[in-house]
Image: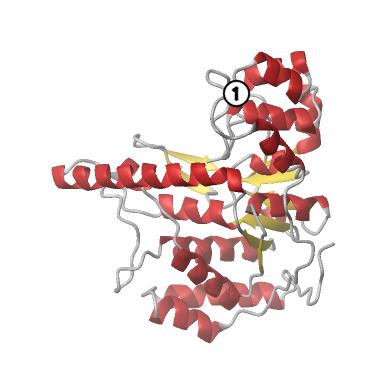
Amino acid sequence: MGVNFKGIITSSEIELADLTGKKVAIDAYNTLYQFLSIIRDRVTGEPLKDHNGNVTSHLSGILYRTSSMVEVGIKPIYVFDGEPPQFKKGVVEARKEMRKEAKKKWEEALAKGEEAMKYAQAATALTGEMIEDTKKLLDAMGIPWVHAPSEGEAQCAFMCRKNVVDYCGSQDYDSLLFSSPKLVRNLSITGKRKVPNKEMYVEIKPEVIELEKVLKENGINQKQLIIIGMLIGTDYASGVKGVGPKTALKLVKKYKTLDKILENVKWEGDVDAKEVYEFFLNPPAEEKYNIEWKQPDANRLIEVMVEEHDFAKERVEKVIEKLQTAFSSGRQFSLKGFLGK
């Protein structure tokens, strides 16, 4: 879900080709949820499935969107979540209940013959099997991935700060709270997209947000940006009732520090504000990892996508050709044995 910074953050729209040669650490869970949410029947909300009834929407998104990135010379690295912080457990359980309720409403809408898409999207769940299938697909494509010790976006931000990658890739703004110097949004939804509940389409392009610029334009420092995010509401706590981005900015400029803020607002929920604050300042991150872009394994890709999950062989072969061409032309390269420090 992420923090909502709209109204106080500006971005620069770019073309996908502007990222040629750039390495991007992509928040895998965030991206997979997007694919699971978007790649569905627009009326019934049913996701793509194979002959065994396994959901494949996420695999479709990873296969085609990632190959499009690679084709223009982007070097993606997918970063998977590890163990969430202890104080997030309540949020995780609450989301499970929300998804159960949404699934019930989805089934009721289908039974009534009503449009069910919004309920289907709200019921979206990412399973362990989906995650493992995604890793198998990435391995076959020759795309590296990293397993974070905790939050994926924190790991992405760490890699960006250390200049291992040029950008964090996510729809959420949370990587800014983890001090990522640069964030690129819309990587997984670039192109024409239908406006919800309207018969019209818009062109969506990637957009870049620079942390230094955000802090300078708002006259704040990194710690104050974290406080603003906490006041608005993050994945860990709902924030302060009635406080949006602009009000949070005013509060931070007036009171400056978290201690002063907590003296003057009503912090709600069971999560300790200072614990969340410290987590954003010093999140767990893996410092050593191998990153290697490899030649795609054509046979393995056919096995995983065509034989196991019923994708059209001709389309998968076109993806293989894209990946092979990008690799052989030098748009992708090997960093075998590279250790992020």
In the figure, 222 relative to 263: above or below?
below
User: As shown in the figure, which amino acid type bears the numbered disc 1?
Assistant: Trp
Figure quadrant of residue 289: bottom right
Q: Residue at x 41, y 37 (%)?
A: 195
In the figure, 173 relative to 256: above or below?
below
- Work out which residue is located at the far left of the displayed protein and give it: 112
The quarter of the rendered structure image containing the C terminus is bottom right
Q: Along the horizontal axis of the image, is 216 left or right of 318?
A: right
x%, y% of residue 17? 68, 54
Q: Residue at x 52, y 63 (%)?
A: 62
x%, y% of residue 164? 80, 59
Question: Number of numbered discs present?
Answer: 1
Q: Secondary structure at mark 1?
A: loop
Q: Along the horizontal axis of the image, is 51 left or right of 236?
A: left
Q: Nearer the viewer, residue 275 or 239?
A: 275
Q: Residue at x 68, y 38 (%)?
A: 275
Residue 205 visible here: no
Figure quadrant of residue 232: top right
Q: Nearer the viewer, residue 211 or 283?
A: 283
Residue 233 visible here: yes
Residue under circle 1? 267
Q: Residue at x 77, y 57 (%)?
A: 165
x%, y% of residue 258? 74, 25
x%, y% of residue 54? 35, 68
Q: Along the horizontal axis of the image, is 224 left or right of 248?
A: right
Q: Residues within 10 Å of mark 1 (few under 14, many from 20)?
A: some
Q: Nearer the viewer, residue 13 or 28?
A: 28
Structure colour scheme: secondary structure
